[in-house]
Image (cartoon, helix red, strand yellow):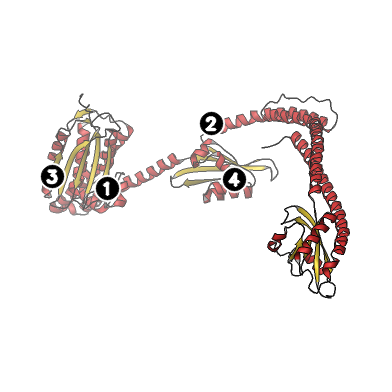
Amino acid sequence: MTLSIRWKVTIGTLLVLACGLLIARTLAIRSLEQEEIVRSEQMLEARASLVAYGLQPFLVLPRPLASMAPLQAAIRDLSSRALARVTVIAPDGQVLADSAVPDGSLATVENHLGRTEIQQAMSTGRGTALRKSSTTGERTLFLAIRLPIQNQSTASVFLRLGLPMASFDREVDKLHKNLALAFGVAFLIAIALSVGLARSITKPLSDITIAARQLAGGDHDVRLRTDSRDEVGLLADTLNQMTDQLKTKIHELSEDRGQLLTMLTSMVEGVMVLDNRGRILQVNPALEGMFALTQSETRGRPSSDVFRHPELNTLVATVLATRTAQQDEIVLMPGGQCLHIEAAIAGGAGKNDACAVLVFHDITERCRLETIRKDFVANVSHELRTPLTSIKGYVEALLDGGKDDPATSAKFLDIILKQSDRLNFILEDLLQLSRIESGQIQFKRDPLPIQRIIERTLAMIKPAADKKGHKLLALVADNLPPVLGDEDRLMQVLSNLLDNAVKYTLENGTVTVEARFVSDKAERPTLTTAVELSVTDTGIGIPERDRPRIFERFYRVDKARSRELGGTGLGLAIVKHIVEGLGGEVRVEASMPTGSRFVVRLPAQPINPPVS
């Protein structure tokens, strides 16, 4: 929790006062206790001398203190006279007499040799200690002296007097209460004074804080009023002036920023602004979409960390180093998006004031169309050149004398005719493909029985299949709904697929045509959504790497074999365009263990479920 300045000043003052009062109380109690201990020690020394004098008769025996009872009685008498607890301790620490211990319990008193005061008396002849007595349970000041035994030069006993500090402790407790009461009253007075003092200091600062918060919230009309001419008053006047200037600047910047953001947002091209160190200052939504980034991910970061593209990073480094306009084209992976980048220096004249502006033009479609155009021109040129070259070669052979030999002439002319037919087929397929793509051919959506289309197409392809010894099979499910399509176009699709299956299947193979339901009740309310038509052969098959490209124009798995069999390379491309034009889908699969399987999914006439 954050405290205001007012409470920080108040609490700080009170803490200092409290610490001072506690220190004064501690020092006063400690000084009083030390004086009491010194006075008590002096009193115990005087009483110890009197008690030692009273014990003279018991220190003249050959074996002193042989009888405990007389000694215990004398100790009790001396204790009552000295107003202190009296204990006599043997040199080995055994308690011989103690005024605070009953006569019958002396034997159970623990050895006192380890007591602090006894250890000091043993070393120096005198010892003192202040502690809680284990016998009486009271805090007691002990004084011990060593008493020599007469007629025994090396023997001695220890006399110990103990003065209970209970009365002193009671006085100290009373003093604690009085000091606590006095300190409490002083503390309450200090609280009132501290709060008032803190308020007088922090109230202007609180007003300034509130005004600054309103200013930060967008209220540029806030004003501070103060009659004070001290530092706080000067601060208020300065804040008012700053508010006026800030209001003007924000208005100007808002207009400029609004215009800039509107322009950047509406641009189709991507825009990126870098500072002189290559850190990103601004990107527009178009650029975010190109690189799948957000402004929070890019703002303030080096462009080389955000765009990990070597060519782009090289372009940025060159622009910043040479301070000249640059341009380049890059390709983004894995999507293959093609971008044309124009980079220039903008901003102030100083090196540290200038920045770089990069504009990204998406030319992906242009690059794609250019690639398609180049590939198409190359493929068409190649496909047309092959029969034309053959025709030209045989015509030259005829002109060189081949026409004089009727057999040779007939053979060459037959080859020329076949190559002309092949050239005509290629041109017809190209024209048909062009008309389909341009929308010149309108597909019908008539309900057609798929079984009739299969039977008619098989009848057309049967002579070619019989010639190679192929077996044609038709597996058509019962009660298939009519498909929605164009009969002539569907026969063209099926005949192209069957023609390829017959061509690329070795002699005595099997070609199977199958039609079945494709139902999906979870996504659509109808029981039947499509009819799936498949053509499966036992031929040479299509390698896995070639399947994604099998429907491209002029794409062949085995070019030499395709030309030998008379294919144009456009049949499957036409199949794909017709099926998609009818609202269907086409794909190719591997047929295990050999061969290929082409699958065509066609929209079918819906069959509503029976009403129960």
Q: Position of residue 607 (x, y in %)?
A: 21, 28
Q: Is residue 331 visible?
A: yes
* 477 sits left or right of 423 in the view: left
Assign the C terminus to one quadrant of the image.
Answer: top left
* 586 sits left or right of 355 in the view: left
Q: Amino acid at mark 4?
A: Arg
Q: Amino acid at mark 3?
A: Leu
Q: Amino acid at mark 2?
A: Ser
Residue where numbered disc 2 is placed = 266
What's the distance in space between the residues labelled 1 and 3, CA to CA? 36 Å
Badge 3 local density, few (<14 within 10 Å), some, or many (20+)?
Answer: some
Q: Which comes sooner in the sequence, label 2 or label 1? A: 2
Judged from the image, the secondary structure of the residue bearing numbered disc 2 is helix
Q: Quadrant of residue 37?
A: bottom right
Residue placed most toward the observer, 437 or 317: 317
Assign the N terminus to one quadrant of the image.
Answer: top right
Residue where numbered disc 4 is placed = 301
Judged from the image, the secondary structure of the residue bearing numbered disc 4 is loop
Residue placed most toward the observer, 20 or 377: 20
What's the distance in space between the residues labelled 2 and 4, CA to CA? 24 Å
